[in-house]
Amino acid sequence: MTIRVGIVGVGVMGADHARTLATQVPGAHLHAVQDADAARAAAVAQETGAGKSLTDPLALIADPAIDAVLIASPDATHRDFTRACLAAGKPVLCEKPLAPTARECLEIVAAEAALGRRLVQVGYMRRFDPAYVELKAKLGSGRLGRALMFHCQHRNVAAPAWFTADMAIGNSAVHEFDIARWVLDADMISVQAFKPRGPAPGAAVGPVFILLESALGQLVDIEVFNNAAYGYDVRGELVCETGTVALAPPVRTVTNATLVHGADYPADWRPHFADAYRLQLQAWIKSIETGHPVGASAWDGYVAAAIAEAGQESLARGQRVAIKLAPRPVLYPAAA
Ligand code: ISE
């Protein structure tokens, strides 16, 4: 069985997914790629051997020769394209965020619930990252007792000048919101977000610190620093009743040079999470073959967006904010 895939949007992430799909995902055939920039779509099609390149996203989604769609277009388009896939009855892997607002995410949830079967997977790829998978398994083994705290750090080299603290929450920290729910198997009930005083107004966005409380009383602290300069660096440590377990930095080589001993950092998330992206795509294709959905659901996409909005509100008001979720449709079983 071969699943014929079309990709909507082949910018940085879409092109990366296209390369992985074309070369490392058994059972998938990259049938077509779409981009508003015709030259870019054609170049990615040529590089990856995709049979077709086009500029109309809805034509790609409607194409009867396409069985499943990967959406990697700008965030503002995610809701409409995901809904078009649902209307066409096609499985869809939508890059995070599912949509820019919780309200739009809920529209997707409602549309999928009305359909009565899960077709949407959201690209929260850390759920497939071998290090996070092992962290969760070690917690699940019971050897460390119950989880009490989860320390998370998320550092990027640099963000564009227009990147704001709200975007640090809505675009970057959403990964931690999702992975914390998944690792702890618990929903979050409150959020408080802080910014250190300074840097001076007008300077690039500095660190944002976020504290979540889970329904089981666990604390999750998150530092997101989009202008950390030194490298792409994601860390996590669970503090449990009788021990701790942390993600080990993905280091393959250590360099000795004049007066230096050290490891390199990647410039962005793609090398750091290369295995996660590949495993996510392989699991997505397998889930279409078997009919058993995997990964973050539309509901999980909604919850991440709802936590982000509560976090943004907390930052604006300088107060802890309760996370209130819409009623959960039966389509989505209780575990995160
Ligand atoms: C980006 O959109 C991602 O999804 C990356 O994984 C994350 O590390 C980065 O902070 C986001 O801006």
Image (cartoon, grey):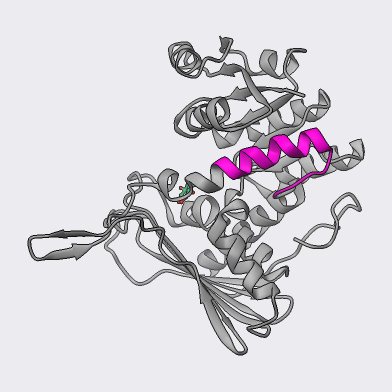
* Residue 210 percent location from the top left of the image: 51, 70
Q: Quadrant of the N terminus?
A: top right
Q: Quadrant of residue 290?
A: top right
x and y percentages locating residue 7 in the rendered image = 60, 24
Front one among 50 and 101: 50
Instruction: Write the start and end of the magenta stretch as one range.
Output: 278-295
The picture places residue 178, in percent across and down from the top left corner, at: 63, 58
In the shown orientation, is residue 103 left or right of residue 278? right
For the view shown, which residue lies furthest in the bottom direction? Answer: 242
Q: Is residue 154 visible?
A: no
Name the residue: 50% across, 53% down: 172
Give residue 118's position: percent from left, percent from top. 83, 41
Q: Residue placed at 58% from the left, 80% from the top?
A: 149
Residue 137 visible to the viewer: yes
| Residue 20 vertical position relative to residue 252 in the rendered view, above or below | above
Q: Nearer the viewer, residue 222 or 169?
A: 222
